[in-house]
């Protein structure tokens, strides 16, 4: 008789549906929205796809494509090396980050009501502390995921929400990022929007604080997540392993959550 272990129980619970696998990933295609930068900077291309062969003269029995895309396209992972503040850490690229960091508990902070009335909503330290009062202290090495329901916006225009003064979308306040990175030692910060920072964060102090401070503390990022409304505040486990791109700054990836049934 085989021994009962945590992993054999996990397999059993997956089989009987008491643990559900939730896909936190956007479909990745030519229409996938990509962040735009002011025109003085180089732009990251979205995905383009070209058929190599499809059961035809170029390959009678096989189908495959060539894809071209920026590392930070669609649901994607930000490595510490992505930002100048994280460039000197050891093991800071997609191929060298310890794989242990690709599996972590999720703390999901629901900001959907706030975002519905205020598209520039900023998550503050006080908001996180109120969440902790209800759900318990954020443990070191946890993902903090900001649920905004932004992923329910359809089409590039609504998702990127660019106005005359640039993009408008929710994100974390600089002080909140400092709190999570330095006082809670989180694994990283994940969002539903196109990047981990708020749309207007180019004008914050420091600019793009989630990139600046998270990566400056060796932490990770996840952007363009879906289905955060299917996660409990605590108790889910996130599996987010980027492609092993040599010297990569990030990568599209399939993000999965293991979620216990209520
Ligand atoms: Mn990114």
Image (cartoon, grey):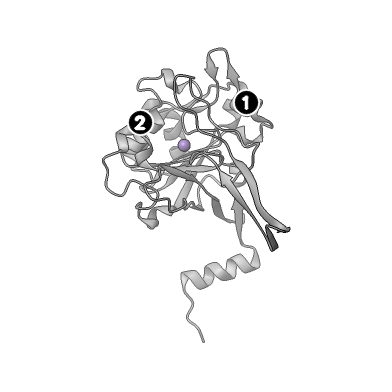
| Percent coordinates x, y for residue 93 in the rendering | 36, 47
At a point 46% along the width and 74% down the height, the residue shown is 5
Say whether residue 206 is left or right of residue 136.
left
Residue 26 numbered tag: none
Residue beneath disc 2: 212
| Camera-nearest residue between 56 and 114 | 56
**Which one is earlier in the sequence, the residue at label 1 or at label 2?**
1
Observer-side mark, 1 or 2, equals: 2
| Percent coordinates x, y for residue 159 in the rendering | 62, 29
At a point 72% along the width and 58% down the height, the residue shown is 57
Image quadrant where residue 19 sits:
bottom right
| Camera-nearest residue between 212 and 43 | 43
| Camera-nearest residue between 240 and 122 | 240
Instruction: Specify whether residue 53 is in view.
Output: yes
Residue reaching furthest to the top: 164
10 Å crowding of disc 2: few (<14), some (14-19), many (20+) = many
Numbered disc 1: secondary structure: helix
Numbered disc 2: secondary structure: helix
Q: Is residue 205 above or below residue 58?
A: above
Residue beneath disc 1: 116
Q: Is residue 4 above or below residue 221?
A: below
| Camera-nearest residue between 117 and 222 | 222
Instruction: Specify whether residue 24 is in view.
Output: no
10 Å crowding of disc 1: few (<14), some (14-19), many (20+) = few
At a point 36% along the width and 20% down the height, the residue shown is 205
The C terminus sits in image quarter:
bottom right
At a point 49% along the width and 70% down the height, the residue shown is 7
| Percent coordinates x, y for residue 183 in the rendering | 31, 38
| Percent coordinates x, y for residue 133 in the rendering | 44, 38
Say whether residue 148 is left or right of residue 63.
left
Residue reaching furthest to the front: 57
């Amino acid at each position: 008789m085989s021994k009962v272990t945590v992993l054999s129980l996990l397999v059993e619970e997956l089989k009987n549906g008491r643990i559900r696998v939730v896909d936190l990933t956007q479909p990745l295609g030519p229409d996938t929205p990509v962040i735009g930068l002011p025109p003085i900077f180089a732009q990251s291309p979205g995905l383009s796809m070209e058929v190599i062969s499809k059961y035809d003269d170029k390959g009678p029995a096989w189908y495959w494509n060539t894809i071209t895309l920026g590392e930070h396209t669609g649901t994607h992972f930000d490595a510490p090396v992505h930002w100048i503040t994280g460039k000197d850490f050891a093991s800071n690229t997609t191929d060298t980050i310890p794989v242990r960091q690709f599996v972590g508990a999720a703390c999901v902070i629901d900001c959907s009501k706030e975002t519905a009335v205020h598209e520039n909503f900023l998550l503050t330290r006080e908001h996180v502390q109120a969440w902790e009062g209800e759900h318990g202290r954020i443990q070191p090495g946890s993902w903090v995921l900001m649920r905004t329901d932004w992923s329910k916006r359809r089409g590039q225009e609504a998702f990127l929400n660019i106005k005359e003064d640039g993009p408008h979308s929710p994100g974390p306040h600089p002080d909140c990022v400092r709190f999570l990175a330095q006082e809670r030692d989180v694994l990283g910060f994940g969002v539903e929007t196109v990047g981990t920072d708020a749309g207007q964060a180019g004008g914050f102090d420091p600019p793009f604080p989630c990139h600046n401070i998270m990566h400056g503390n060796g932490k990770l990022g996840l952007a363009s997540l879906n289905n955060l409304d299917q996660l409990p505040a605590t108790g889910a486990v996130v599996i987010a392993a980027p492609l092993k791109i040599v010297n990569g700054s990030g990568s599209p990836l399939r993000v999965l959550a293991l979620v216990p049934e209520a």
